[in-house]
Image (tube, rainbow, N blue to C red):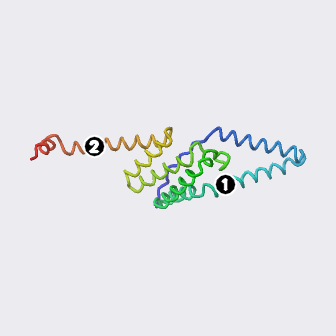
């Protein structure tokens, strides 16, 4: 039985505006080309073409990312890591696809696919109990994306847990046991 994984979505309002403008331009073009009497049919055709482009680009270019998300939801974290690593490698080789994801993938995400891949890999390692790998991938995400709110928040949480664990360990040792150990007894 898998737990529902958290899902963080930050929408780029610039991308949303771009999509709305694109649809309006297509609608106005259809009105000019087909005439007002066929505007309803043209609207359906344009909406259909937009949806087909959306799903085709998402499937063809971001398929590994989407499969990784599916594997996370299924609790299959090892397989998810493989998919996110492949997604990261693809978008790292083709950074222009990720940079212009508003058009190439019809994505309105404010996060790049490379950033999402890194934080998703970190999350999967965390779910598998691999603390060092988790921290490593969040640090990698922050190094490549200094404004990454997800990486910052998770690293802050990890640091708090590390401080708490260190404090608990110091309390467990105690001052008298620590002094004896230091004296070599």
What residue sits 22% from the left and 42% below the top?
171
Q: Left or right: where does residue 27 sit relative to residue 113?
A: right
User: How far from the left and from the top, in percent, is residue 154?
Assistant: 43, 43
Closer to the chain start, of discs 1 and 2, is 1
Q: Position of residue 65 (x, y in %)?
A: 56, 55
Q: Position of residue 153 (x, y in %)?
A: 45, 41
- Tell whether label 2 touches label 1 (CB within 8 Å): no
Q: Cα distance, mark 1 to mark 2?
A: 48 Å
Identified at 78% across, 50% down, the residue is 46
Q: Residues within 10 Å of mark 2 (few under 14, many from 20)?
A: few
Question: Where is residue 83 drawn, in percent x and y?
Answer: 52, 58
- On screen, residue 176 versus residue 150, left or right, reads left
For label 1, the SS is helix
Q: Which residue is mark 1?
A: 57
Q: Does 166 sit left or right of 67 as displayed?
A: left
Whether 3 is drawn above or below 179: the answer is below
Q: Nearer the viewer, residue 110 or 42?
A: 110
- The residue indicated by pointer 2 is 166
Q: Residue furthest front?
A: 93
| Frontmost residue, 81 versus 164 | 81
**Few, some or many residues within 10 Å of mark 1 (<14, 14–19, 20+):** some
SS category of the residue bearing label 2: helix
> Residue 5, labelled with which disc?
none
Closer to viewer: mark 1 or mark 2? 1
């Amino acid at each position: 039985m898998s737990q529902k994984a958290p899902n963080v979505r930050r929408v780029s309002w610039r991308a949303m505006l771009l999509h709305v403008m694109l649809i309006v331009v297509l609608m106005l073009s259809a009105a000019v080309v087909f005439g007002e009497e066929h505007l309803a049919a043209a609207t359906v055709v344009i909406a259909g073409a937009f949806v087909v482009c959306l799903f085709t680009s998402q499937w063809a270019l971001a398929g590994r990312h989407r499969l990784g998300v599916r594997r996370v939801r299924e609790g299959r974290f090892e397989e998810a890591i493989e998919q996110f690593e492949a997604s990261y490698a693809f978008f790292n080789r083709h950074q222009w696809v990720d940079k212009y994801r508003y058009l190439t993938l019809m994505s309105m995400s404010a996060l790049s696919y490379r950033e999402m891949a890194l934080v998703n890999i970190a999350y999967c390692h965390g779910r598998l109990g691999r603390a060092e790998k988790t921290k490593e991938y969040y640090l990698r995400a922050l190094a490549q994306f200094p404004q990454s709110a997800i990486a910052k928040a998770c690293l802050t949480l990890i640091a708090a847990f590390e401080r708490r664990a260190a404090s608990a360990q110091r309390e467990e040792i105690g001052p008298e046991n620590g002094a004896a150990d230091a004296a070599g007894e």
